Image (tube, rainbow, N blue to C red):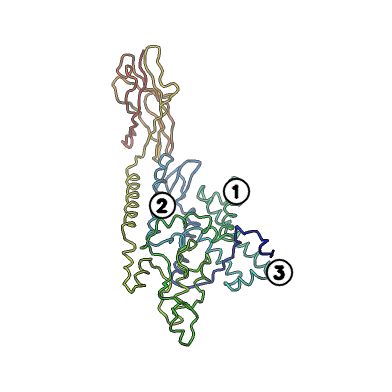
Amino acid sequence: MSNTENKAPQLYAAREPVFPRKVKGKFRTLKWWLLGIAMAVYYLTPWIRWDRGPNLPDQAVLIDLAGRRFYFFMIEIWPHEFYFIAGLLIMAGLGLFLFTAAAGRVWCGYTCPQTIWTDLFILTERWIEGDRNARVRLWKSKWDARKWRLRLFKWFVWLLIGVATGGAWVFYFADAPTLLVDLVTFQAHPIAYLTILVLTLTTVGFGGFAREQICIYMCPWPRIQAAMMDEDTLTVGYRHWRGEPRGKRRKGADAENLGDCIDCMACVNVCPTGIDIRDGQQLECITCALCIDACDDVMEKIGKPRGLIDYLALSDEEAETHGATPKPIWRHVFRPRTIMYITLWSLVGIGLLVALIIRPDIDMTVAPVRNPIYVTLSDGTIRNTYDVRLRNKHGDDRKFDISVSGDPSIGISLEGREGNSVIVPANETLLQRVYVTAPAGSAPAKSDRTEITLSVEDKVGEEKVQTSTVFNGKAQ
């Protein structure tokens, strides 16, 4: 029996490292611009100041977990307003569906954090170790002093990028200047250091070592995108009718029978996931369009028209193969599916904007106390207890008057207060216990359930909010 027959079947193929070659072109330039903008937004946003008045944080974007508040410039989201966050997530999902249906995985190729940080790590790797050929030679060489020196320096730079990434993230959860001083003087909370450590390791691991493996194996979107795409979706593709049969350019009779593709492998060498786009649409393709730049450069050098590899739809490729005119780009972008996504996205956005405009500056939540549901006093009066949470979103203390309506005989009193008024501090939530009573013989005391309305009025701002609830109890 041969050695080959004795070998056990391999269930996992070892990773072949990918060393993308440097490329220039309009899509590579676009990616550099987006990388710079994304990095600037991520690292600089926590340092932008925004004056909200006294006793409020002046950080423009802040996730205040201790105060249970989210600040975004002039917008302040309270815990009970989480529907704003849910709405934004729905808009993000619809936006992702829209862009995928129109132009494939443009999110993956241009703005996904994994793509952006991987580009940054590859840039530093190219700066330290050289372009593709130099990095391939270094990978195959023995571990001598030069290789150790280059690798250690590269890993050190990656580590600095990872620390900066994790450090910038924690600044979104506390006042950035204060937290920076605490971190440097080792006075910050251990959670801050732990968060930075975890994000540092994951950033270096994902962007420096795993790279395309994250896109291929860990990310679920490549497997979902097929449901968002159809024959009219614009995506990176290869014009087979023009490029085949491929072959090296040479003189002779056979040269006239060759297509425009000279099989130079430029499109493969620049691909960050190491695929050959000429093999058709593949799960690994992130639609970064770097292969377009590389191929256009080669076509220009050999005197052939650009666009052998280009953004095109399957329907266009089919039309071009048979000599027909492809659809204009606007018809690919604006078609029933994308119009539906645009409509849904707009409706959710308009709904959130309207909700943001009409939301009151005072608010209340009423929770009836269920144990016991009601109490019968010695004179036959029925009493219900409610926990009323009052919210004052103004920048100063406000006096709230609490009242009840539904039956003239119903009375109200506040625990620990004289009268029906309570002072709620500025930008705070106050929990107040409220007692609602119905005298014996009154209509509410004769019914198992009576609809009532609790109201809170701000006398200064002349604002009023109401909440319907139920008065329980029946006199014996």
Front residue (pair 366, 294): 294
Q: Is residue 381 left or right of residue 208?
A: left
Q: Quadrant of residue 418?
A: top left
Where is residue 275 drawn, in percent x and y?
51, 67
Residue that numbered label 2 is attached to: 93
Residue 145 marker: 3
CA–CA distance in space, label 2 to label 3:
49 Å
Q: Is residue 308 above or below residue 344?
A: below
Contact between labelled residues 3 and 2, with CB atoms less than 8 Å apart = no
Label 3 crowd bin: few (<14), some (14–19), many (20+), radius 10 Å: few
Q: Is residue 137 left or right of residue 391?
A: right
Identify the residue at image location x=41%, y=76%.
242
Is residue 36 visible to us here?
Answer: no
Q: Quadrant of the C terminus?
A: top left
Amino acid under disc 2: Gly
Residue that numbered label 1 is attached to: 194
Q: Nearer the viewer, mark 3 or mark 1?
A: 3
User: Which badge, 3 or 1, comes first in the chain's sequence?
Assistant: 3
Q: Quadrant of residue 245?
A: bottom left
